[in-house]
Amino acid sequence: MTPRSLEPPFRDEEPPPQRERRSVQGPGAKDPRDPERLYVITGGTEGAERATLDLVTLIVARADPPPAAPPEQSAVLRMCRTPLSTAEISAYLNLPFSVVTVLLGELLAAELVQSRAPVIRGAVADRSLLEAVMHGLQKL
């Protein structure tokens, strides 16, 4: 029996060719994070009127998208029929958070959406509630 070589057989060879990632939008399409596109989406605003939103602010649509609304705003209004955080909206639209805050600021100014702070649960339960639960369990 001849001893096997412990080195991998591809050590001196070239690595296998890597496939390029296909674009979701097809050949010749622009990158969705193209700075020019983001500038157009935000209308070139500098953010002076930007609403104070953070990543966990919940957004709820108050109306259906108007026919003249840009596609991104229409998408936000359709998405937010149930409450969504601004982070989720940013992820679903594949847009930076700063661009989403500008879009949401415009929708808030037009009163098409409503923003709410998330519901924060108390960190510690009430002692009397815990005692009542404990006594109830003991009676079982």
Image (cartoon, rainbow, N blue to C red):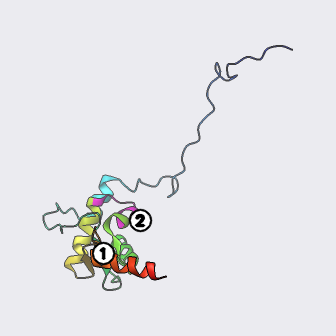
Question: The N terminus is located in which quarter?
Answer: top right
Q: CA distance from mark 1 to mark 2?
A: 14 Å
**Bounds of the magenta span?**
89-97
What residue sits 12% from the left and 64% below the top?
Answer: 48
Circles 1 and 2, Cβ within 8 Å, touching? The answer is no
Quarter-wise, where is residue 7 in the image?
Answer: top right
The disc at residue 92 is 2
Dominant SS type (magenta): helix
Labels 1 and 2: the sequence-earlier one: 1
What residue sits 61% from the left and 28% below the top?
Answer: 15
Q: Is residue 34 above or below residue 11?
A: below
Instruction: Give the side of residue 118 with respect to residue 13, left or right.
Output: left
Which residue does the numbered mark 1 point to in the structure image? 59
Most foreground residue, 123 or 60? 123
* Residue type beneath disc 1: Ile
Most foreground residue, 53 or 99? 53
The disc at residue 24 is none
Task: Check disc 1 and report its element: helix, strand or loop.
Answer: strand
How busy is the neighbourhood of tag 1: few (under 14 within 10 Å), some, or many (20 plus)? many
* Residue type beneath disc 2: Tyr
Instruction: Give the side of residue 47 with respect to residue 77, left or right.
Output: left
Residue with the most extreme left position: 48
What residue sits 33% from the left and 69% below the top?
Answer: 85
Q: Is residue 111 magenta?
A: no
- Which label lies toward us, 1 or 2? 1
**In this orientation, does residue 69 appear?**
no
